[in-house]
Amino acid sequence: MKDATARTGRRPRRPRHGPAAVLLRPARWLAVPVLLAVLGALTGPAAADPTGPVEPVSVRLRAVAGPVSEALAARLRVHGGERIRLTEQRADVTLALGDAAFRAALAAPGHGPVLGLGIGAARIREQVSPDCRCSAVRAGVPLAAQLAVLRDLMPGARRVGVMLGPDSAWRAPLAAPVGLLLDVVEVDPPQRLGPLLRRHLPDWDALLLPDDPVLFGPGTARLVLLTSYRQRVPVFGPGADYVHAGSVASATPGSDGLARAALDWLSRWRATGEWPAPDFAGHYGLEINDYVARAYDLKVAPGARLERRLETDP
């Protein structure tokens, strides 16, 4: 050691240890691939900053102009924040509100990804397929959500009638919770609705209706509500319009629930490139007709407990 120092005047370099030494060893043909691998690990997707800015999804809302579409757009802005950007131009995704807008969006050439909102069961069966690049948030609410409303407002009910048609949001058989009998009546064709109501209503404590644009549309609301009122049988469901017309109460997604569901579907599509299968919104509010409820001597005090149950029920 002293001889070497004396000849060169410099202290011999000590051998390096650790990962850096690998790149400095004489076998330099190994250094390039190892260095590239290290750089790749540092700059690849795994090293991306998860908290960094994310480009918003551009969304075009296709709907019949009016207060409903305006309310939905407003709720999308509130809940979407910086995750989405509503535009009238070409967009990443089209949101189509209602059956007619959904059909038109899918008929447009080169339509791209489409999500229908508040789409009826018949339209979903006709248009949602594996190659359509589309999905839908179903119209109406699941049976469990409507039963939560009925049992909270009418805990003494034991036998409940449910009338179903070919286009109803629910399909038989229906599962009833413990202590409740669901008496399912199939109505086909719709012209049989009146006679079947008069025959079965006396046997029921309440009538529970699914979303069905044919069986329980505007044309039959008067028949259903007046016939049931004469028989003193409260009607629950199928949505906000029926509650305003005279049913007792209904769970309903409304503009807020549809907006939140749309954002749920969009998050899944953005993460996986695929839409979730058609399903109900999963977010529901509560509509109650206080006047009709009082007419049936029903206690209207669901409170936060019922609201939470509607939010979590499938």
Image (cartoon, helix red, strand yellow):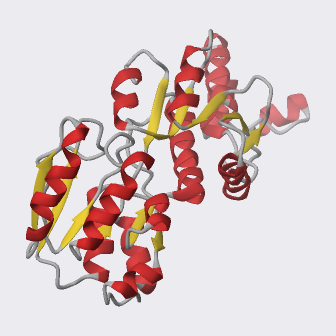
Corner quadrant of residue 89: top right
* 223, 60: nearer the viewer: 223
Where's the C terminus, which quadrant?
A: bottom left
Q: Is residue 91 left or right of residue 116?
A: right
User: Residue 44 at x, y = what percent?
Assistant: 65, 30
- Residue at screen point 56% across, 54% down: 260
Q: Is residue 89 above or below residue 121?
A: above
Where's the N terminus, which quadrant?
A: top right
Corner quadrant of residue 226: bottom left
Corner quadrant of residue 81: bottom right
User: Residue 23 at x, y = what percent?
Assistant: 67, 25
Q: Is residue 194 left or right of residue 41?
A: left
- Count of numbered circles on the image: 0
Q: Is residue 211 above or below residue 12?
A: below
* 127, 132: nearer the viewer: 127
* 191, 287: nearer the viewer: 191
- Residue at screen point 39% across, 49% down: 280
User: Residue 46 at x, y = what percent?
Assistant: 59, 37
> Does the rendering let one see residue 295?
yes
Q: Is residue 105 left or right of residue 288?
A: right
- Residue at screen point 35% across, 45% down: 212
Q: Is residue 154 above or below residue 203?
A: below
- Residue at screen point 54% across, 33% down: 115
